């Protein structure tokens, strides 16, 4: 199975509403109202979040954009 090199963590993503999230790089995987809820979800669903962090959509969100200009 593919192992993602991206670290999963809990981060504050907003000042209002769902303030905290489980993130993989720049990609937000899930949002929560409290840091405790986010930490608990990360502990209980770590396997799912690790799998999700290795997905193509998260990899694309975390990659550097490449611009190709055609003349």
Image (spheres, grey):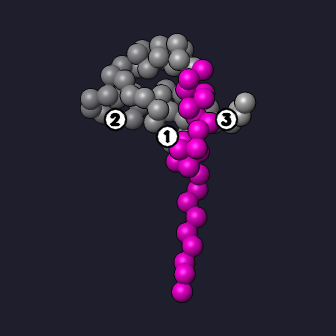
Query: Can residue 8 be seen in the rendering of this structure?
Result: no
Identify the residue shown where x is 44% and y is 20%.
38
Q: Is residue 64 magenta?
A: yes
First in sequence, mark 1 or 3: give its number: 3
Q: Which corner quadrant holds the N terminus?
A: top right
Identify the residue shown where x is 54% and y is 81%.
70
Q: Position of residue 20 (x, y in %)?
A: 39, 27
- Measure the alpha-carbon separation of dots 3 and 2: 26 Å
| Left or right position of 36 against 71 | left
Q: Which residue is mark 3?
A: 4
Q: Which residue is mark 1?
A: 27
- State the extent of the magenta-drawn residues as a range: 47-71
Say if 59 sits above or below 17 in the image: below
Mark 1 or 2: the one toward you: 1
Say if 43 sits above or below 52 in the image: above
Q: Position of residue 51 (x, y in %)?
A: 60, 29
Q: Which residue is mark 2?
A: 14
Residue 38: which disc?
Answer: none
């Amino acid at each position: 199975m593919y192992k993602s090199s991206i670290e999963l963590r809990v981060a504050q993503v907003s000042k209002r509403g769902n303030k905290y999230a489980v993130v993989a790089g720049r990609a937000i995987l899930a949002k929560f109202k409290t840091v405790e809820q986010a930490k608990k979800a990360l502990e209980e669903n770590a396997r799912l979040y690790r799998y999700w962090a290795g997905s193509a959509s998260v990899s694309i969100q975390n990659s550097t954009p490449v611009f190709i200009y055609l003349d």
